[in-house]
Amino acid sequence: MIIDGHIHAGYWSAERFLGRGVPLPALEDCLAECDIDGGVLTSTDLRRNDLVLEFIEGERKKRYWFFPWVNPGVAEDLDFVEERKARVDGIKLHPSCDRIKVTDERVVPFLEFAGRQHVPVVIHCGRWQEMSSYRLALEVAGKYPDINFILSHMGGDTPELETATTDAIKERALANVYLGIEGVREYWAVQRAIDELGADRVIFGSDFPLGHPRMYLGLVDALTLSAEDRQKVLGSNILRLLGEVE
């Protein structure tokens, strides 16, 4: 199976993305065109988690998992996931957009929720090091070894940050940290992460509709992988974190 591990469902409000988005039914058309079997869905910066869940619960052709984008500064977001805990497959934190570091005490209730529910946590890691550094994400991962964390953009969306993240994970022996390839352009940085950490730690994702699955399928094609390791990256790793496979 091929699973897109990072899809934003809906439209963006951030000016830099120029209102980018697609109607939700078009999401299924895109996955079908790319021979992708399903995906992990989160909201855009509008955080319309209710609409994402409504889409998932409809009559769909593909399999989807729900990762609500939560803002730790909004009390209602904790209520939202608690009230729908049976439907929540993971949670998404975006320090850059929400202006709250993952080390902030307001994040703790959401991490405790993930721990109780045994669901993974996706953390956006970007170039804004004061707010969304991979170092902050790894600090949290070290404090919560029983939670699996997926660092978006391989920890930072630049080759320097991507490789530094790989090195830090290896140095700290953090077995609960995984790297999403969405937004990454340097295939060789992905190859390096696999060589250093193993194919078990890398997860295919597209950031659709900001990116396209074909772009990242092409990135995986550029890697030197055995058939088994290719399947890990394209689907088995995320399915294992979701409890779908052993």
Image (spheres, grey):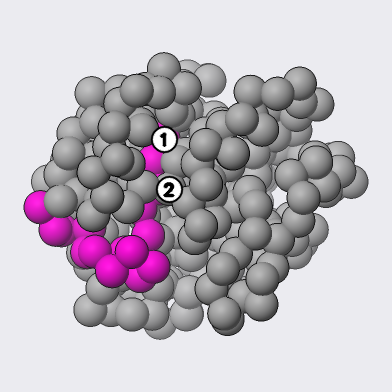
Q: Mark 2 points at which residue?
A: 69
- Where, by quadrant of the figure, is residue 135 drawn? bottom left
Q: What stretch is highlighted in magenta?
A: 90-105
Q: Closer to the camera, 131 or 234?
A: 131
Q: Does residue 2 sit above or below 246 in this rendering? A: below
The residue lying at 15 percent from left, 44 percent from top is 108
Query: Is disc 1 placed on a helix, strand or loop?
Result: loop
Whether residue 61 can be seen here: yes
Q: Closer to the camera, 97 or 5?
A: 97
Q: Does residue 207 sit above or below 116 in this rendering? A: below
Q: Name the residue under label 1.
A: 90
Q: Earlier in the sequence, mark 1 or mark 2?
A: 2
Q: In this view, does 125 lie to the left or right of 140?
A: right
Q: Within 10 Å of the Cα at label 2, are there few (<14), some (14-19), or many (20+) other Cα atoms?
A: many
Whether residue 195 can be seen here: no
Amino acid of disc 2:
Trp
Amino acid of disc 1:
Gly
